[in-house]
C-alpha cells in the first residue's frame, strides 16, 4: 500500500495562509527559467540552484546547509514521491496530501465531498462544509499534470453539484491535457436537465466517459441503496440526455447483499432501455466509509452470487454490450467469468494475501483492497493450473 497522506517533519515554507499545490522534480538538467515553479527532490549532496523549493525525507535535512529557499522534510513513508508528482501542502505546513502521481494509472481527483446521495456503501461519506478549495486544487493539478498521462478521473461527492464549475473543469482538462482521457464518476441526475447535458457536450472533450451507477432495475431498491427518492427516474433521464449528445457512458453496479438478487433483471433493463451505453462495470464491494458501518447489511460472500453474476455478464456480452468485472478474486469466480475480470484496484491500495504467493494466476488476479482486513472472503484458495 502506498500512503497518500504524510506528515511534514520540518518546513521553512513561508506562511501563505492557504494550502499550496506544488509539483516535484528530480531533473537536475531542467532549464533555469523552468526551475522557479518546481520543488526539487534532494538525494545525495548535490543541491542544484534555482528551484522554488527543496524536499527531503526523514531527518536528512540535517545534511544540507540551511537553504534560503523553502525546504520541506517529509516522513520516510512518503519517499515514494518522484519526478512529476503533485502534492498539496496544508496551510499550517504540518501535512501533505498526494494529489497526482505521474507513474500511476489511477489518478482520481476529488472535486467535492458534497453529495445529493447518501449511498449505503459510500466510500467517501458526504460532508456539507464549504470545500470550494478543491476546485482550485483541481485547476492546479490539471495545469501541472504530465501531458503524457493516459487517463485521469474526476470524483466526489457528486461533481455535478459544482454546476458550471464542473463544466469549466472538464474544459480545463481538455485544454491542459489534450491527449488524456477523462473519466468522471457521477450519479447522473444533473444531466436530467437537457441544457446542462448540452453544456457538457459543447466542451467537446476528445475522450470523456461518465461512470454512472445503477444498483437495480427496481426503483425502490436503487433509491434505497442511494438513500434518495426519485433517484432512479432522474438518473435514467440523465442517461438518456447524455446519449442524445453522444457522450460515452459507463454503468457501474456495486455488488453486495442488497443488489445481488436482481443482477440478471438489471442486465435486461440495461439492454432493453439503455442499449446506447458504452460499457457496464460490475464492481466488488470496497470495505471503507459507510460500507464498513453497514457491513452486516451489505456483506455477502462473493462466491455465493457468482452464478447470478455470470448470468448477467453473459446476457450483456452476447448482446454486444462491453462488460467487465472489477475488484473480485479469480479463485472465487467460475472460469467462464475470468475473461471479463479486470485487474484495476488502484495501485496505492492493492494488496494480496499470503496464500496468493502459492497461486498460479496471481499475475492475472486483481487481488484485494487493503480495506479487506475488515472483511476477507472465507473461500480464498490458491489456484493450481
Ligand atoms: S489465491 Fe489470491 S491471487 Fe489467487 S485467485 Fe485467489 S485472491 Fe487471486
Image (cartoon, helix red, strand yellow):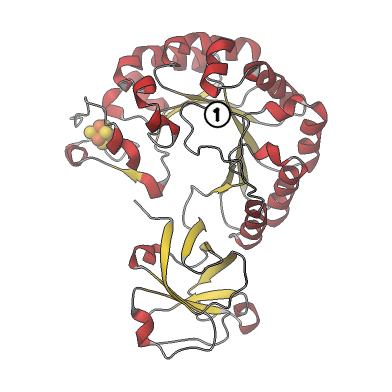
- Residue 317 versus residue 150 in the image, above or below: above
Q: Is residue 104 left or right of residue 174?
A: left
Q: Residues within 10 Å of mark 1 (few under 14, many from 20)?
A: some
Q: Secondary structure at mark 1?
A: loop
The quarter holding residue 371 reads top left
Q: Is residue 309 left or right of residue 115?
A: left
Furthest toward the front, the residue is 129
Furthest toward the right, the residue is 195
Q: Is residue 87 left or right of residue 358?
A: right
Furthest toward the bottom, the residue is 65
Q: Residue 146, position in %: x, y? A: 58, 60
Q: Quadrant of the C terminus?
A: top left
- Residue 88 versus residue 300 in the image, above or below: below
The quarter holding residue 185 reads top right
Point 57% across, 41% down: residue: 127
User: Which residue is label 1 attached to?
Assistant: 118
Q: Residue 10, position in %: x, y? A: 43, 76
Q: Residue 83, position in %: x, y? A: 49, 68
- Residue 211 versus residue 56 in the image, above or below: above
Q: Quadrant of ligand 1?
A: top left
Q: Residue 223, position in %: x, y? A: 57, 17
Query: Quick check: can you spot residue 369?
Result: no
Amino acid at each position: 500500500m502506498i500512503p497518500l497522506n504524510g506528515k511534514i517533519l520540518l518546513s521553512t515554507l513561508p506562511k501563505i495562509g492557504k494550502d499550496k499545490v506544488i509539483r516535484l522534480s528530480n531533473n537536475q538538467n531542467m532549464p533555469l527559467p523552468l526551475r522557479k515553479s518546481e520543488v526539487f527532490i534532494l538525494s545525495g549532496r548535490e543541491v542544484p540552484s534555482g528551484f522554488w523549493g527543496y524536499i527531503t525525507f526523514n531527518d536528512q535535512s540535517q545534511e544540507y546547509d540551511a537553504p534560503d529557499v523553502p525546504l520541506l522534510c517529509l516522513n520516510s513513508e512518503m519517499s515514494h514521491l518522484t519526478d512529476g508528482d503533485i502534492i498539496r501542502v496544508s496551510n499550517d505546513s504540518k501535512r501533505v496530501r498526494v494529489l497526482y502521481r505521474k507513474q500511476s494509472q489511477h489518478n482520481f481527483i476529488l472535486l467535492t465531498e458534497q453529495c445529493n446521495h447518501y449511498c449505503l456503501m459510500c466510500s467517501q461519506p458526504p460532508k456539507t462544509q464549504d470545500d470550494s478549495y478543491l476546485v482550485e486544487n483541481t485547476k492546479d493539478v490539471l495545469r501541472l499534470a504530465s501531458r503524457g498521462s493516459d487517463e485521469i478521473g474526476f470524483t466526489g461527492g457528486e461533481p455535478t453539484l459544482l454546476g458550471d464549475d464542473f463544466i469549466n473543469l472538464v474544459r480545463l482538462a481538455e485544454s491542459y491535457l489534450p491527449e488524456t482521457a477523462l473519466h468522471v464518476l457521477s450519479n447522473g441526475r444533473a444531466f436530467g436537465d437537457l441544457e446542462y447535458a448540452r453544456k457538457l457536450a459543447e466542451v467537446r472533450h476528445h475522450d470523456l466517459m461518465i461512470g454512472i451507477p445503477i444498483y437495480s432495475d427496481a426503483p425502490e431498491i436503487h433509491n434505497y441503496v442511494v438513500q434518495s427518492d426519485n433517484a432512479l427516474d432522474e438518473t435514467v433521464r440523465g442517461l438518456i440526455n447524455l446519449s442524445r449528445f453522444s457522450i460515452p457512458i459507463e454503468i457501474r453496479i456495486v455488488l453486495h447483499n442488497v443488489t445481488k438478487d436482481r443482477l440478471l433483471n438489471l442486465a435486461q433493463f440495461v439492454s432493453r432501455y439503455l442499449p446506447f451505453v458504452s460499457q457496464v462495470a460490475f464492481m466488488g464491494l470496497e470495505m471503507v466509509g459507510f460500507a464498513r458501518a453497514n457491513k452486516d447489511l451489505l456483506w455477502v460472500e462473493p462466491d455465493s452470487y457468482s452464478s447470478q453474476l455470470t448470468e448477467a455478464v453473459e446476457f450483456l456480452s452476447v448482446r454486444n454490450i462491453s462488460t467487465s468485472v472489477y475488484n473480485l478474486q479469480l479463485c472465487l469466480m467460475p472460469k467462464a467469468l475470468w475473461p471479463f475480470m479486470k485487474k484495476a484496484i488502484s495501485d496505492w491500495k492493492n494488496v494480496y494475501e499470503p496464500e496468493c504467493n502459492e497461486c498460479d494466476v496471481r499475475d492475472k488476479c486483481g487481488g484485494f483492497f487493503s480495506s479487506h482486513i475488515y472483511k476477507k472472503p472465507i473461500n480464498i484458495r490458491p489456484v493450481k493450473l
